[in-house]
Image (cartoon, rainbow, N blue to C red):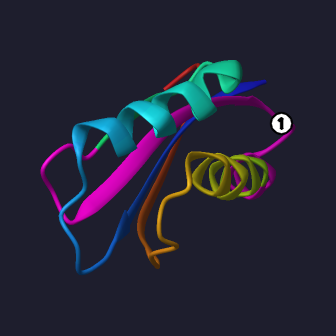
């Protein structure tokens, strides 16, 4: 089953357009989009294949962490995760 997982992390520094563009490039292979320009939060919406909601959240969180590292963003704590199935 396909799942759409939105993840948002919050920190203490305003993020630039260039940083969020790097995040967008990093999540693109996962069918993802990124947000956070001019904010102290950054996030992404990722598409994952998983048998259930919990596995989808786990896979997307792993991919999000890799994308954050690839984009060179500061590692902020995740403050929101939302998982929607394709039938929702």
Tell me if residue 19 comes above or below residue 40 in the rendering.
Answer: above
The residue sitting at 58% across, 54% down in the picture is 68
Q: Is residue 28 magenta?
A: no
Q: Say which quarter of the image contains residue 18.
A: top left
Crowd class of label 1 (few under 14; some 14 to 19; many from 20; radius 10 Å): some
Q: Say which quarter of the image contains residue 27.
A: top right
Tell me if residue 51 comes above or below residue 38 in the rendering.
Answer: above
Q: Is residue 13 left or right of residue 9?
A: left
The residue sitting at 70% across, 20% down in the picture is 29
Residue 77, image x, y percentages: 46, 79
Tell me if residue 20 comes above or below residue 49 in the rendering.
Answer: below
Q: Nearer the viewer, residue 8 or 50?
A: 8
Quarter holding the N terminus is: top right
Tell me if residue 61 comes above or below residue 35 in the rendering.
Answer: below
Q: Nearer the viewer, residue 16 or 11?
A: 16
- Residue at mark 1: 50
- Secondary structure under the numbered disc 1 in the rendered image: loop
Q: Is residue 80 left or right of residue 38?
A: right
Q: Is residue 39 left or right of residue 3?
A: left
Identify the magenta region.
36-58
Q: Say which quarter of the image contains residue 28.
A: top right
Q: Is residue 49 magenta?
A: yes
Residue 78, image x, y percentages: 47, 72
The residue sitting at 66% across, 47% down in the picture is 70
Q: Nearer the viewer, residue 29 or 51?
A: 29
The mark total stands at 1
Residue 15, image x, y percentages: 25, 56
The residue sitting at 65% across, 57% down in the picture is 69
Q: Residue furthest left?
A: 38
């Amino acid at each position: 089953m396909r799942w759409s997982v939105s993840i948002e992390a919050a920190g203490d520094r305003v993020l630039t357009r260039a940083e969020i563009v790097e995040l967008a490039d990093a999540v693109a292979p996962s069918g993802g989009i990124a947000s956070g320009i001019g904010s102290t939060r950054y996030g992404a919406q990722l598409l994952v294949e998983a048998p259930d909601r919990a596995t989808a959240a786990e896979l997307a969180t792993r991919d999000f962490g890799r994308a954050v590292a690839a984009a060179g963003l500061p590692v902020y704590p995740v403050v929101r995760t939302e998982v929607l199935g394709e039938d929702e």
